Amino acid sequence: MKTTFIVRGRAISTIDLIRALLSFGFGAFMLIFHLTTIAIIAWGLGALLFIDGAMDLLLELRLRQDRSHLLIGLGDMALGIITLLNHQVTLVLLVLAAGGFSLLQGVGGLWRSLHQPDRSQRGAATWFRAVGSVIFAIILVLLAKFLLIVAYVVLGVYLLFDGGTRLWRMFAPGPVHSATTEMLTQMENDSDFIPQDGLRAVVFLRRNGALGLGHVGWAFEWQTGWFNAGSVENVSGRAFARPDVMNFWTLHTLDPVAAMQRQLEPYDEYKIFIVTAPKPRDAWGAVVWVSRTPYSVVRHNCADCVYDVLRTYGLSGMVDTAQLNAPKDWYDALPATSIPIAVDPTIMVRPQALGRLHPGAPTDILLHIHPGEQGVPPTWRLEGGRFWYVASQKIEIVLQSIAAVLQRARTVIVSRRASATATEGVAEVPMADPRVRPPRRDRTPVAK
């Protein structure tokens, strides 16, 4: 299947077009055939809850670290079965459960505020948050069905708008933006910069990987100036793969860009981050854990692996992969300048690393992890109830998108009002009537 095609000078990914059409079509379907769509959504939620609960059970049976995984897994599986059998009752129960959870949080916060008073600004914020949680819980409990309808309509409008916006960006007439000389110079400066008060973390992207969804890899710097680079390639494209067939690789290198380019399919671009409090040893423990954890398209794909390694390394401010599942969407949301490898194929190496290098010594060391070496799973991957966490992150990204649209609309309205006010404030200069003769100039000579 053709992965990209050209429209108006733009390279459009086939998978992006499919995603836009699905979003637009499903949003329209939701608003027109609401009863059928509610049943489809409920069945999908039931299946996800059952699968999530089963994965929590498997995690507990494998690690045997926290009995709460067992209870959460059984609860999710039971709720999933109930949802598949009677979705109308379950959706209301989910809203009521969310209300009860919010009520418990709010009451707990008020209890702590009353028994441990804190008159600082932080204490006041905690108190207001607790009161807000209680009010939100009461609203959820009293207006459960009404709020379900509101949430359903908002979701349908959001999907319709999101798909329409994606399609407009693909096919709208207009100039094709390309990198200017100033942008390319800035990119080269970014890759040549060597921080003195921190170490570097790098995210690499293969934009057309995974049928257009994208593929990412990592690199992080040691104190010696060497980098650890790696990825989970999953060349077979399976939704689930054992560690021995998911094409994991890692190496130490002085040239991470060249290491990425030597893979079976080269990468296209990268972003560099400065980490002021790096923890490379902890990150290596996460790399070992990644190498022994089966690939899963929903919980442990290439973007999840990069996120886990670099977050453990100390990189903050990354978008959670639970919000953006497509690797290239996640990469594009990272707060840094993307540098095309074709423009700048090198990352500057620290002089001390080159100074210790013997003539003829290799600059790449392919690593084979010893079976006895213990990996360290990130703490956020040991928590149960992944379904609820992902659902909350999805809701957050939807709310952020809606807030961004409203903010842009407000900016446009304010700018237009300001422009109209400025136009009205300009005094109009009366036009001279051509029928009126101008007064004769006094030609009396001036006395000298």
Image: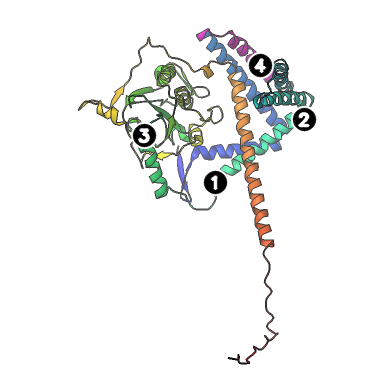
Q: CA distance from mark 1 to mark 3?
A: 37 Å
* Front-lying residue, 49 or 320: 320
Q: Dot 2 corresponds to which residue?
A: 146
Residue at horizontal 37%, vertical 37%?
191
Q: Are marks 3 and 2 in contact (CB under 8 Å)?
A: no
Q: What label does residue 81 carry, if any?
A: 4
Q: Are marks 1 and 2 in contact (CB under 8 Å)?
A: no
- Magenta range is 63-86
Q: Residue furthest left?
A: 359
Q: In this figure, what is the number of numbered marks?
A: 4
Residue at horizontal 63%, vertical 16%?
76
Q: What label does residue 194 carry, if any?
A: 3
Q: What label does residue 427 carry, if any?
A: none
| Residue 85 appears anywhere in the view | no
Q: Earlier in the sequence, mark 3 or mark 2?
A: 2
Q: Earlier in the sequence, mark 1 or mark 2?
A: 2
Residue at horizontal 62%, vertical 45%?
408
The local secondary structure at tag 2 comes to helix
Q: Amino acid at mark 1?
A: Arg
Q: Describe residue 121's horizontal placement relative to residue 448 as left or right.
A: right
Q: Describe residue 328's horizontal placement relative to residue 417 as left or right.
A: left
